[in-house]
Amino acid sequence: MVYDGHSYIVPVATKLKSFYLPVQFYIFSDGVYIIDADDPYKELIGSKVLKINGVAISKLLDDMNSFVHQDNKYTVKWFAPSVLRFRGLYESYGLPQGSPDMVIDLINRKNESIACKVSFIPVASFHSIPKLIPSTLAKGVPVPLYLSNIQDNFWFKELPGRKKTIYFQFNPVEDKSNESLGSFGKRFGDTLQNKKPGLLIIDVRHNNGGNAGLLQPLMDGIINFEKSNPNAKIVIITGRNTFSATQIFISLMNKNTHALFAGEPSSSKPNFVGEENYSMLPWSGAIVSISNKYHESIPGDKRQWIAPNFPVFLSSTEYFKNQDPVMDLILKKFD
């Protein structure tokens, strides 16, 4: 209600048992689908969700705007699939307290309408919102580049078959065990000056933040590259996971470079209240965060997000076939 994505209560508690659904949802351009599941529900992967506990998915998503902490509506789109898994949510829609299972109405991969009873399981841990995973249904189709190495904090490669195109994936704004982000920023800047790519693609779709104090060497390398290579194009791919310290990064790129943006809007604002400060509620053991710092990267900017120059919203068909329509558009646009 305060419209602050860094002020929230974690939906599990250390002193209480929490339960959730053993299926992972994702909101695509054409609806909500199950993208992953534990046994014995793996056959549900690829199914479109119509209702949960008798409540239409459209109503549940609309209500998420009241339940989910947010900087803008894309924060809700990012967090809602995880909130939809928790039993406590559905007790507010009439599910008897402590119910062992619940019915989900679906359209399965055979295009059949089914009602599936799914049992709740204890929540083992809940540290962060799951990131998008490679499709498990795309048999024999290579994993797209943007989903191929999410666990690595930062990496880049020259794209094969593309003359002077470098793809840089920037995941958390954190050091690696064997290289600091500052050292990488200098190394990456040197590579850009030596290779002089005509197209630099920066992918921050999986980056939901970290320590903004680490950003300067990386930003210096990119800014200096653009200044010395004014004909080069920089395209930044953003998405609903682009948040917090990464919002600062893209805001400063927007302010200090001619970078273009593609993909989904970011889930934060160019200027936002941030920083997580944790406390534990004494009775339940629930973790609470209350933010306390205003980040004004672009003074006076009132935008709710950085709107992409090339908006692309992933469909379920593209995802389950391991396609990346954002990269396809960029490579075609700047061929």
Image: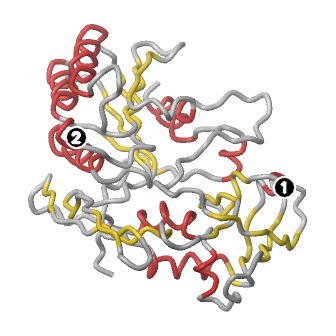
Q: Left or right of 147: which side holds 202?
A: left
SS for callout 1 = loop
The percent position of residue 6, horizontal first and vertical second, equals 30, 64
Residue denoted by label 2: 253
Q: Left or right of 163: which side holds 30?
A: right
Seen at 77% across and 73% down, the residue is: 104
Seen at 48% across and 63% down, the residue is: 79
Quadrant in the picture for the N terminus? bottom left
Seen at 53% across and 79% down, the residue is: 62
292 relative to 243, above or below: below
Q: Quadrant of residue 186?
A: top left
Category of crowding for the residue at label 2, using alpha-carbon neighbours closer than 10 angstroms: few (below 14), some (14–19), many (at least 20) = some
Q: Nearer the viewer, residue 223 or 169?
A: 169
CA separation in Å, label 1 and label 2: 46 Å
Q: Left or right of 270: which side holds 162?
A: right
The percent position of residue 185, horizontal first and vertical second, equals 24, 24
Q: Left or right of 6: which side holds 253?
A: left
Residue denoted by label 1: 40
SS for callout 2 = helix
Task: Tell me which numbered mark, 1 or 2, is placed earlier along the sequence.
Answer: 1
The percent position of residue 90, horizontal first and vertical second, equals 63, 82
Q: Amino acid at mark 2?
A: Met
User: Residue 289 got which mark?
Assistant: none
Q: Amino acid at mark 1?
A: Pro
The percent position of residue 89, horizontal first and vertical second, equals 58, 80
Q: Nearer the viewer, residue 305 or 334?
A: 305
